[in-house]
Image (cartoon, helix red, strand yellow):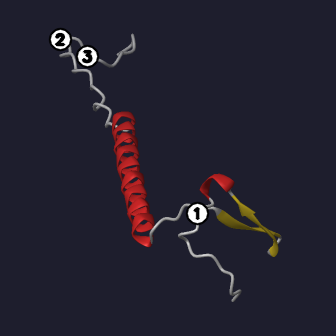
Amino acid sequence: MNNDYKKPADMAEIRVFHQDRFVCRAICQELAGSTISLKEIEKARSERRKQVRAGLSTRTAVVEHFIAVHHEEAPPPQVPEKQPEPAGRPKLKGYINE
């Protein structure tokens, strides 16, 4: 491991790689003197995870609602009521010679 490895607290510097080969170090002049503690990084990550979970929960609820609305069971088809057959006349047609 390289001895000049910068800890996560150094927010001003990143290492630039291209095709898995080290190219250079990029330094942000505005942040060059600033540092951040490991606890602050952990807190920021934790807050971000909470935000992501909340967003996913909201999206899950919206998707479940959408699915429920579009997959509601259709009402059963209505079977027409049978009309009573008229009395006295047979349904079958008879021949003249019968």
CA gap, disc 1 and disc 2: 100 Å
When asked about the image quadrant of residue 42, the answer is bottom left
Q: Amino acid at mark 3?
A: Pro
Q: Position of residue 10 (x, y in %)?
A: 58, 68
When asked about the image quadrant of residue 31, the answer is bottom right
Q: Which residue is mark 1?
A: 11
Report the quarter where the C terminus lies: top left
Earlier residue among tags 3 and 1: 1
Direction front: furthest residue: 33
Q: Residues within 10 Å of mark 2 (few under 14, many from 20)?
A: few
In the drawing, does residue 27 fall left or right of residue 78? right
In the drawing, does residue 1 fall left or right of residue 10? right
Q: Which residue is mark 3?
A: 90
CA gap, disc 3 and disc 1: 97 Å
Q: Nearer the viewer, mark 1 or mark 2?
A: 1
CA gap, disc 3 and disc 2: 7 Å
Q: Which of these two is toward me, 26 or 43? A: 26
Report the quarter where the N terminus lies: bottom right
Q: Amino acid at mark 2?
A: Gly
Q: Residues within 10 Å of mark 3 (few under 14, many from 20)?
A: few
